[in-house]
Amino acid sequence: MTDTNETSYTPPKVWEWNKESGGRFAAINRPIAGATHEQELPVGEHPLQLHSLATPNGVKVTVMLEELLEAGHSGAEYDAYLIRINEGDQFGSGFVAINPNSKIPALVDGSTDPPTRVFESGAILLYLAEKFGAFLPSDHTARTEALSWLFWQMGSAPYLGGGFGHFYAYAPEKIEYAIDRFAMETKRQLDVLDRHLADSEYMAGSEYSIADMAIWPWYGGLARGLLYDSAEFLQVHTYEHVNRWADQVNQRPAVKRGVMVNRAWGKPEGQLHERHDASDFELRTQDKLEPEESSEEE
Ligand SMILES: N[C@@H](CCC(=O)N[C@@H](CS)C(=O)NCC(=O)O)C(=O)O
């Protein structure tokens, strides 16, 4: 066994904030909460106001809203505004007022008196499912199964994103111990899903539900080779039932629209920075807007 003490870090008695710690998110990470600046949020015409970004956590909610509209729930019309987390929009006073945790997504429902704020993607999915009576099975057993998988996702994905993704793709140095630990856990989670989806069409049985909407952006994205350039490393093609389910969900028209909303990177025709109307998918993607409005961000 190697003597780790010679090379490894020994924590000081009291941790101090080291601004030079590096890594992709070093500029926005800080050990305190609260607003850093005054910044009011825009307010649109629809009852539901979403402030988000098309990361996997954001996509869960835009897919749900598009699914509700697709299913004919016109009360789910929404305005979606972009929160650029790399520029610190999540620390503006208006955003902190609707999510004290300063993370996207956050939703305001102006159809209630007073307006209701909802933060945490899982809570938003559940709020919308209950408000519209949709995408959460009414049968007690299936509903319980959907909620079990919804909360499974909320507890599991931080190991995938904050653990595996962070140390494999974003950390300033490749640390074998950390990558091994989180690759192992990520593969275990994929196997959990694969075994379940071998016998179940969707996460909660035969009905597509908010459990699929929560899990698909993370684990479907991983299986489809879209996260962290890790498809070969994790051998994601071996999880055949996860792949079957991921492709099936990906075919849904509402999913195809949902992934475009608040997206500010990738192909211009796939980016709809703000969404206010169904026609925006045809008329307001970045390729259709004036060239100077086009974003070149990663
Ligand atoms: N558990 C939260 C996680 C949300 C989250 O981590 N959001 C990230 C983007 S995916 C974010 O806003 N990060 C900004 C920051 O950490 O400052 C949820 O599911 O809503």
Image: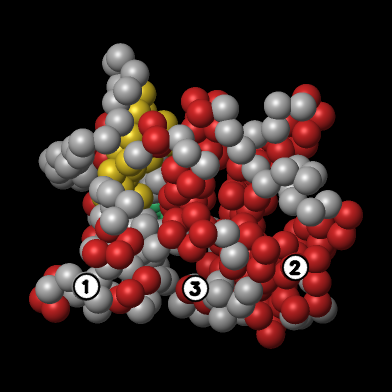
Q: Which residue is mark 2?
A: 244
In the rendering, at what x and y percent does residue 246 appear? 67, 64
Spot the residue most to the front. Answer: 72
Spot the residue most to the top. Answer: 113
- Work out whether residue 239 or residue 103 is closer to the camera in this orientation and state it: 239
Q: Which residue is mark 1?
A: 288
Q: What secondary structure is marked by label 2?
A: helix
Q: What secondary structure is marked by label 1?
A: loop
In the picture, the quarter occupied by the C terminus is: bottom left
Nearer the viewer's eye, disc 2 or disc 1? 1
Q: Which comes before the other along the chain, label 2 or label 1? A: 2
Nearer the viewer's eye, disc 3 or disc 2? 2
Residue 186 position by quadrant = bottom right
In the rendering, at what x and y percent does residue 279 appear? 29, 56
Q: Which comes before the other along the chain, label 3 or label 1? A: 3
- The mark found on residue 17 in the picture is none
Vertical relation: 295 (above or below) 106: below
Q: For the residues marked 2 and 1, what is the alpha-carbon distance in whole angstroms?
A: 34 Å
Vertical relation: 131 (above or below) 69: above
Q: Residues within 10 Å of mark 3 (few under 14, many from 20)?
A: some
Q: For the residues marked 3 and 1, what is the alpha-carbon distance in whole angstroms?
A: 36 Å
Q: Residues within 10 Å of mark 1 (few under 14, many from 20)?
A: some
- Asked if residue 110 shows in the view, the reply is yes
